[in-house]
Image: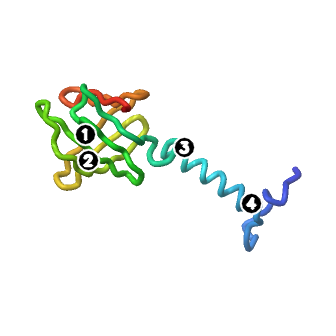
Amino acid sequence: MNQTAAQQDVLDPKAQRASPRAFASRSAGLCLAVALLVGCGGGGGISGDWGGDGCIYQKMTFQRGGKVLVTPVLFGMELPTSEARYEVNGDRVTISTPEDGRAVTFTREGNTLRGGGLIGNCVKL
């Protein structure tokens, strides 16, 4: 069976260091695997402003690095905006506040985050 130089470098345990071609091939594979794990688009796969009338949050602004600014609404009154953290796991988006440890999990369906119950549904603004 014929092998390219890159394949021989990858398969040869005695090789001191891989050729640039083998390194590039392994790097591309690793980047693809990471992209599939965290979702397309980087940053967890969600960004921008979400909220609306049917949501407990008047507005949620998802930013890079797992940071989200949330502006809750209580009995029609907008409460002060605070910073929270978010994590995306598949179609689930969990927002948590480090101060009190509370968390809210939404299920993403296209441009809607479904929270159910009192949380409601938030849409992309």
Label 3: element kind: helix
Which residue does the image show at 71% across and 62% down from the upper left?
23
Q: Which residue is mark 4?
A: 22
Report, in whole angstroms, how far the alpha carbon at label 1 lies from the one at label 2.
Answer: 6 Å
Q: Looking at the rendering, which quadrant does residue 78 occupy?
A: top left
Badge 4 vs badge 1, beta-carbon distance below 8 Å = no
Kindly identify the amino acid type of the residue bearing the numbered disc 4.
Ala
Nearest-to-viewer mark from 3 and 1 = 1
Report, in whole angstroms, how far the alpha carbon at label 3 lies from the one at label 4.
Answer: 21 Å
Badge 2 vs badge 3, beta-carbon distance below 8 Å = no
Report, in whole angstroms, how far the alpha carbon at label 4 lies from the one at label 1.
Answer: 44 Å
| Quadrant of the drawing holding the C terminus | top left
Kindly identify the amino acid type of the residue bearing the numbered disc 1.
Val
Q: Which residue is mark 2?
A: 96
Considering depth in this image, is 80 or 67 the residue closer to the camera?
80
Which residue does the image show at 27% across and 50% down from the upper left?
84
The x, y position of residue 82, in whole percent, is 22, 50
The x, y position of residue 35, in whole percent, is 55, 47
> In the image, 48: left or right of 83?
right
Label whose residue precedes the other's in the sequence (3 or 4): 4
